[in-house]
Image: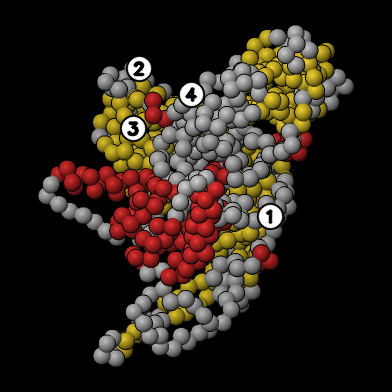
């Protein structure tokens, strides 16, 4: 494939491959020779690497939609944005939707660009969720269940400009009303909004907004997807390639195919969709096999402050996978995301990164991901629109459980309420093992601090619910309670709903991008030693697919300033080589044509320098040079315009 010949120079690593073109699934063997200053030569042992899928044509199958028929019809009907000039910085505008309906249940989805208040149906108030005024971002789309009598109705509400540094001159809203029409057929109303003119009882047609961003649908349950297939004969290897817009967890013949968590990790999905490849050679059986996937919101669909839900792209959540089985004779048998997949509701009823997770454990179907399972009442999976972005291999280590913490103390605070101290602030989740009755509710809330009274102090969380709710199956067996698609930053956990909680029933799973820890620091001054240890735990907690600013509140964003200041230290304590390459790729994708970056894509110019110092990775530094120069030029143009040197 390639003979580099002798390459003179000081660099002994990071030499770019320059041989024959590489193709998908190709296995390459290599070794390297080095010479010292006395011209003595030594050869390494032979090593190998394996190529993933390098071309779009190599993917078998299509994108599967993680939604049911009702969700799909809601999405296709959409919601039209209308707007009106704001009366003032604090004054609200009134909106109204007159409509007719038959008798029955209805569902209203509504989202405001501004602060919504006074939501009513036929003059009767509808409850609005309380929103923390310190929340970093506006309220998400609201889902309201209605019971309507046959006849004419009107939904009214008021929208005021959102306070802050940049008060918009307009207010806007988008909504969809799914209801039983006068003819008894389900219909979806998305148009017909009116705006108050300021005169008593006078309404005018609301203007359709010039820009129509996608509607950020409220959370929907995760879905279980499964497919069976036959495999005959012996095989040499099997690889499962997975790409997703959303979160996923995968089983093959009832066993998890990996230890990765929070997949797919954050990315600029509009430009590239990360793919991971798993070695499942040991899991493929002769005869009937079963693939099972639980797919949910993940980072793609969760609320991200301040942009809201689906900030990376439109619904639906999507999944694409391809299982390549290489037979003993070299033939490759492929099982892809095709029409043979079936789906059903998952026990994860709600999951968001900030909010936490709700699980109804009675919804787990027995053996749904094992061979011989017959999905008799499961519906065929729907095809999703192609997202348009290319699928690229994830180029850094995945998020994993890096260690487990046991409780330091468990304090009983009531009849069935306990506060657990894990002795360390970290990012991760609580695992609880319990026996209970059917439908028994258990709640886990998280916090970094305690009040003077010993209760959770959650004031710094802002709008993050940071809580997991469970409803037990109650079949007499031990039940393991643990979220799947979310994580929190905390030291203390309040467990409510368990009368007797023993320390052996609970543990904490620490999550982080699984980087090798390469540097350490030891000193006989406790304060300095603790300062370094706190820094290490901060890196563990904030290297979560991207370098975040915090793991606990409604933020967790890749602020470039945070990364810039910390990168040299981070590269001392951990091997950040691949992590940096991943980030700078996202940063390049996020840069606009004028050279400017968003406020919180991952990576920065200085991080590239720190990377080069620590890892001698000239390719990453070189690939970032053009975008850095473009950014400097854009900054110069901007400074000239505002009269600064």
The percent coordinates of residue 574 (x first, y second) are: 33, 57
Closest to the observer, 633 or 250: 633
| Residue 572: quadrant of the picture | bottom left
Question: How far is mark 1 from mark 2, CA to CA?
Answer: 54 Å
The secondary structure type at the circle numbered 2 is: loop
Residues at badges 1 and 3 in contact (C-beta under 8 Å)? Answer: no
Closest to the observer, 164 or 102: 164
Question: How far is mark 1 from mark 3, CA to CA?
Answer: 41 Å
The percent coordinates of residue 313 (x first, y second) are: 63, 45
Classify 85 as above or below 509: above
- Left or right: 165 in relation to 478: right
Residue where numbered disc 4 is placed: 132
Choose the circle earlier in sequence order: 4 or 3.
4
- Mark 3 residue crowding within 10 angstroms, few (<14) / some (14–19) / many (20+): many
The percent coordinates of residue 502 (x first, y second) are: 30, 30
Choose the circle earlier in sequence order: 4 or 2.
4
Disc sitting over residue 448 in the figure: 3
Q: Residue at x 47, y 76 (%)?
A: 16
Classify 595 as above or below 45: above
Residue where numbered disc 2 is placed: 415
Mark 3 or 2: the one toward you? 3
Q: Residue at x 55, y 32 (%)?
A: 166
The secondary structure type at the circle numbered 3 is: loop
Choose the circle earlier in sequence order: 1 or 3.
1
Choose the circle earlier in sequence order: 3 or 2.
2
Question: How far is mark 4 from mark 2, CA to CA?
Answer: 29 Å
Question: How far is mark 3 from mark 2, CA to CA?
Answer: 24 Å
- Mark 4 residue crowding within 10 angstroms, few (<14) / some (14–19) / many (20+): some
Question: How far is mark 4 from mark 1, CA to CA?
Answer: 37 Å
Residue where numbered disc 1 is placed: 388
């Amino acid at each position: 494939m390639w003979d580099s010949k002798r390459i003179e120079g000081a660099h002994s690593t990071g030499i770019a491959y320059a041989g024959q073109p590489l193709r998908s699934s190709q296995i390459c063997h290599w070794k390297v020779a080095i010479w010292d200053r006395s011209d003595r030569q030594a050869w390494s042992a032979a090593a190998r690497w394996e190529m993933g899928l390098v071309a779009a044509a190599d993917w078998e199958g299509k994108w599967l939609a993680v939604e049911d028929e009702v969700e799909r019809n809601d999405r296709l009907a959409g919601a039209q944005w209308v707007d009106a000039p704001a009366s003032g910085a604090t004054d609200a505008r009134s909106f109204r939707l007159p409509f007719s309906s038959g008798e029955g249940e209805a569902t209203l989805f509504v989202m405001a660009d501004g602060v919504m208040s006074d939501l009513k149906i036929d003059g009767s108030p509808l409850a609005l969720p309380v929103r923390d005024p310190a929340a970093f971002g506006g309220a998400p789309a609201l889902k309201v269940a209605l019971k309507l009598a046959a006849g004419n109705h009107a939904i009214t509400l008021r929208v005021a400009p959102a306070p802050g540094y940049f008060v918009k001159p307009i207010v806007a809203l988008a909504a969809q009303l799914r209801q039983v029409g006068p003819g008894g057929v389900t219909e979806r109303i998305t148009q017909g909004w009116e705006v108050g003119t300021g005169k008593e009882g006078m309404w005018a047609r609301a203007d359709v907004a010039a820009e129509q961003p996608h509607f950020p649908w409220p959370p929907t349950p995760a879905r279980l997807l499964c497919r069976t297939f036959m495999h005959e004969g012996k095989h040499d290897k099997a690889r499962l390639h997975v790409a997703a817009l959303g979160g996923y967890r995968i089983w093959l013949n009832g066993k998890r195919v990996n230890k990765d968590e929070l997949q797919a990790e954050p990315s600029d999905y509009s430009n590239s969709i990360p793919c991971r490849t798993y070695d499942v050679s040991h899991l493929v059986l002769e005869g009937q096999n079963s693939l099972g996937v639980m797919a949910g919101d993940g980072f793609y669909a969760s609320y991200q402050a301040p942009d809201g839900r689906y900030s990376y792209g439109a619904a639906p959540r999507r999944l694409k996978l391809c299982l390549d089985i290489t037979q003993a004779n070299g033939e490759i048998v492929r099982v892809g995301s095709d029409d043979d997949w079936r789906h059903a509701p998952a026990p994860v009823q709600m999951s968001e990164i900030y909010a936490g997770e709700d699980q109804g454990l009675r919804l787990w179907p027995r053996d749904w991901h094992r061979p011989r399972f017959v999905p008799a009442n499961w519906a065929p999976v729907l095809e999703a629109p192609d997202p348009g972005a290319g699928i690229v291999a994830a180029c850094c280590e995945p998020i994993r459980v890096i260690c487990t913490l046991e409780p330091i103390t468990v304090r009983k605070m009531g009849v069935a309420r306990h506060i657990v101290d894990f002795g360390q602030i970290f990012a991760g989740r609580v695992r609880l093992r319990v026996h209970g009755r059917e439908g028994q509710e258990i709640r886990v809330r998280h916090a970094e601090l305690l009040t003077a009274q010993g209760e959770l102090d959650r004031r710094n969380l802002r709008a993050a619910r940071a809580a997991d709710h469970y409803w037990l199956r109650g079949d007499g067996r031990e039940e393991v309670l643990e979220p799947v698609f979310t994580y929190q930053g905390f030291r203390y956990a309040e467990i409510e709903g368990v009368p007797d909680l023993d320390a052996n029933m609970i543990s904490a799973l620490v999550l982080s991008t699984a980087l090798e820890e390469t540097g350490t620091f030891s000193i006989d001054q406790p304060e300095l030693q603790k300062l370094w240890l706190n820094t290490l735990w901060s890196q563990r907690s904030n290297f979560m697919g991207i370098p975040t600013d915090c793991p606990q509140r409604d933020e967790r964003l890749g602020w470039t300033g945070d990364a810039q200041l910390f990168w040299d230290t981070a590269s001392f304590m951990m091997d950040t080589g691949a992590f940096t390459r991943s980030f700078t790729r996202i940063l390049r994708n996020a840069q606009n044509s004028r050279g400017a970056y968003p406020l919180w894509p991952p990576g920065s110019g200085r991080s590239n320098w720190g990377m080069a110092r620590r890892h001698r990775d000239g390719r990453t530094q070189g690939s970032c040079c053009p975008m850095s120069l473009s950014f400097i030029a854009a900054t110069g143009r901007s400074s000239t315009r505002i009269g600064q040197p």
